[in-house]
């Protein structure tokens, strides 16, 4: 067995057995923190031994046996062993090391499930609601800190702190490992239900990885939910949760195509829905209604799922009723995610305008900042309204936010389809008909009509495009416009112009060239003819360098001309020194300005630095153009600026980006949601403070080095 095979086997076994192992250890040693520590020791032992010895016949029992031996060693090493510990150590060494024997011994209590006992311990009222859920997901769901953070829409550090504090609290209180009875049990059910549903959701729509679903988590959540229903038969919300999970799980087989790609609900083959699970879900909902009392969030969500299950086709879905149920749900569970789902229902029942109106009110919600379904829903509504260019940007933003590979693929495909529709809409076809070649005039008009160009850029580009249209002809097929013909126009029109004028028109042609290739209006391969249509366009979110390669660049025959620039006058030394003494300058600006002065790096290089590229002990950072080094002044400020961040841009903007203009993924801090500080903003702030430009800081440092005696 190779090391890779063994590691994959260990991972698979751990996902299946970790909850039962930890739960069994808690029953033995009575301490949640120690139990997880012993389980992790067993996992490390498996990673070390299984590559040499192979996977044992009963890997779960093997892991449990190793973990129990660690527990015995710990008890025997303790300096204050009492009689109870000695007796427990003896029992652990003599007890049969098989998971089957332990399971049989556990069947004599009310629940008969160590995992459920551990869940109630994790949901002890001494813990905060957030800590209860985070700890239970960690111990029983087998979820990583990152997965829990994604489920809660909070930072990983916050989840890790909750788990650590929860373990310490349980240890200090000596919480017994048992299922609570009476009123105490009823009061802790709501937190348990929340945990079960979060486990199910992580399985039903995996937040990361190559698979859309993690069936093991769905099955575990359903198992726990059914056990809870037997434990609390008079609780409507317990039956409501079971109904919701049964009904959602019934659609599992239809949610992906044979290649594993996601299939939207309205496109699913309803013949593949599991009728047995639907029957179980409806029956559980009926039991919930028989319990009486006000309708809770799980009962209402189950009722929504029943509306989908009862519709024989997508067109028969009663969206008006679903919208009404979501309205009721928002009164008992007024979260941003519920409001987003309500917006979808409103759009389906009353038109995309109604849905978009509600979605736009959610764009500023901090909890939805990294929630990829928000831009995905907004993109879908914009597409239905015919606003294809805006929809493209939303789908690309959603693709950048999701960590699930199949979902990202679908979102990028939708973005590409939006781009194609935007081009078709922007180019009114004439006598040639839809299958005729796109002309230079049609392409130029669509290029200049883009909503992402400001007025001054449009004026500048229009001058260039008008000259090309006049000299080459409006009716010239775009596919016949070559770099050679463009170069002839340039030589005649601007051959004797100043370098700045020549370069400005050259930049317009390069932008036009890139745009036409990205929209599929010109072929990527020179051997392809005009029939190479929009369906073969580039991945619009990828930014491939192929767009700028010589054979595709209409400006390939236009060499950039040198523009002589005057020498930048450095700042006076006294002004620079006074700058560092000012107390009204923010930490970000102070750090950036001092870095530029000490390193002599250009503003662009400094602003491109990412946190993960910092070498703080070495007082340097890696950039695309090489290393940037600084001195002690910058070194003293940088740790305060980083403030615990581990990745993303070093210098961040003050505000988070709006949904209409998402930054590139590399320019977005995944921990704060803010984008990279732009050169324009940095230059503006320096001019406001000093009246000078950032390059003058750099020049001052260069001159100081040049004047230093050797």
Image: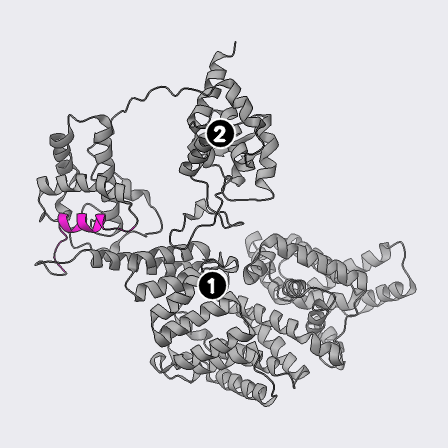
User: Which residue shows up at 59% across the image and 33% down it?
Assistant: 637
Q: Describe the element under mark 1 as helix, strand or loop.
A: loop
Earlier along the polypeptide chain: callout 1 or callout 2?
Answer: 1
Residue sitting at x 29%, y 21%: 564
**Quick check: is 444 in the magenta stretch?**
yes
Q: Is residue 88 visible?
A: yes
Residue closest to the eye, 13 or 175: 175
Please, is residue 670 above or below residue 506 in the view? below
Residue of label 2: 627
Q: CA separation, marks 1 and 2?
A: 39 Å
Asked if residue 637 lies left or right of residue 439, the reply is: right
Residue to which mark 1 is pinned: 211
Q: Residue furthest bottom?
A: 290
Q: Quadrant of the N terminus?
A: bottom right
Residue 407 visible in rendering: no
Instruction: Let me know if residue 271 is in the magenta part.
Output: no
Region rendered in magenta: 435-451
x, y percent for residue 132: 67, 65
């Amino acid at each position: 067995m190779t090391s890779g095979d063994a590691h994959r086997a260990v991972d698979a076994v751990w996902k299946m057995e970790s909850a039962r192992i930890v739960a069994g250890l808690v029953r033995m040693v009575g301490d949640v923190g120690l139990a997880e520590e012993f389980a992790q020791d067993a996992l490390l032992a498996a990673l070390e031994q299984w590559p040499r010895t192979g996977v044992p016949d009963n890997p779960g029992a093997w892991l449990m046996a190793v973990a129990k031996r660690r527990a015995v060693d710990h008890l025997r090493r303790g300096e204050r062993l009492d009689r109870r510990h000695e007796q427990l150590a003896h029992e652990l060494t003599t007890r049969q090391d098989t998971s089957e024997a332990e399971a049989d011994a556990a069947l004599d209590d009310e629940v008969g499930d160590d995992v459920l006992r551990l869940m109630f311990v994790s949901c002890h009222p001494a813990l905060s609601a957030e800590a209860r859920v985070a700890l239970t997901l960690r111990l029983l769901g087998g979820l990583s800190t990152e997965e829990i953070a994604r489920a809660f829409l909070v930072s990983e550090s916050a989840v890790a702190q909750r788990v650590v504090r929860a373990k310490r609290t349980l240890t200090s209180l000596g919480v017994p490992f048992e299922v609570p009875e009476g009123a105490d049990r009823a009061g802790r059910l709501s937190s348990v239900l929340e945990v079960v549903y979060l486990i199910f959701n992580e399985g039903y729509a995996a937040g990361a990885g190559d698979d859309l679903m993690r069936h093991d988590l769905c099955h575990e959540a359903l198992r726990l939910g059914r056990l809870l229903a037997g434990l609390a038969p008079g609780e409507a919300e317990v039956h409501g949760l079971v109904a919701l999970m049964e009904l959602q799980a019934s659609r599992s087989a239809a949610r992906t195509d044979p290649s594993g790609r996601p299939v939207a609900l309205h496109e699913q083959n309803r013949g593949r829905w599991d009728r047995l699970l639907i029957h179980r879900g409806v029956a559980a909902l009926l039991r919930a209604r028989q319990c009486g009392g006000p309708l809770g969030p799980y009962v209402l969500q189950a009722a929504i799922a029943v509306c989908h299950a009862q519709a024989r086709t997508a067109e028969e879905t009663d969206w008006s009723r679903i919208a009404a149920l979501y309205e009721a749900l928002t009164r008992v569970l007024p979260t941003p995610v519920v409001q987003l789902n309500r917006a979808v229902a409103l759009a389906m029942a009353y038109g995309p305008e109604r849905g978009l109106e509600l979605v736009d009110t959610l764009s500023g919600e901090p909890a939805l900042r990294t929630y990829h379904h928000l831009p995905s829903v907004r993109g879908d509504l914009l597409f239905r309204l015919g606003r294809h260019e805006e929809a493209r940007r939303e789908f690309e933003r959603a693709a950048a936010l999701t960590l699930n590979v199949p979902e990202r693929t679908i979102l990028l495909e939708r973005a590409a389809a939006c781009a194609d529709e935007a081009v078709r809409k922007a180019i009114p076809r004439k006598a040639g008909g839809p299958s005729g070649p796109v002309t230079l005039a049609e392409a130029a008009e669509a290029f200049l009509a883009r909503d992402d160009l400001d007025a001054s850029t449009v004026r500048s580009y229009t001058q260039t495009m008008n000259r090309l249209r006049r000299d080459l002809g409006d009716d010239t097929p775009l596919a016949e416009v070559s770099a050679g013909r463009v170069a002839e126009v340039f030589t005649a029109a601007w051959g004797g112009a100043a370098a700045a004028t020549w370069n400005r028109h050259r930049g317009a042609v390069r932008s036009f060239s890139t745009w036409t290739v990205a929209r599929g209006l010109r072929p990527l391969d020179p051997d392809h003819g005009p029939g190479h249509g929009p369906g073969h366009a580039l991945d619009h979110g990828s930014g491939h360098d192929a767009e700028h390669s010589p054979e595709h660049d209409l400006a390939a025959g236009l060499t950039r001309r040198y523009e002589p620039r005057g020498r930048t006058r450095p700042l006076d030394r006294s002004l620079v020194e006074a700058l560092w003494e000012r107390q009204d300058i923010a930490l970000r600006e102070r750090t950036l300005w001092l870095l530029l002065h000490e390193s002599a790096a250009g503003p662009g290089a400094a602003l491109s630095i990412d946190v993960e590229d910092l070498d703080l002990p070495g007082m340097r950072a890696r950039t695309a153009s090489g290393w940037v080094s600084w001195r002690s002044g910058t070194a003293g400020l940088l740790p305060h600026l980083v403030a615990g961040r581990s990745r993303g841009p070093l210098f961040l903007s003050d505000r988070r980006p709006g949904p209409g203009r998402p930054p590139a993924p590399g320019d977005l801090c995944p921990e704060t949601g803010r984008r990279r500080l732009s050169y324009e903003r940095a230059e503006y702030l320096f001019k406001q403070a000093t009246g000078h430009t950032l390059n003058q800081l750099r020049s001052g440092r260069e001159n100081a080095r040049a004047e230093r005696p050797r």
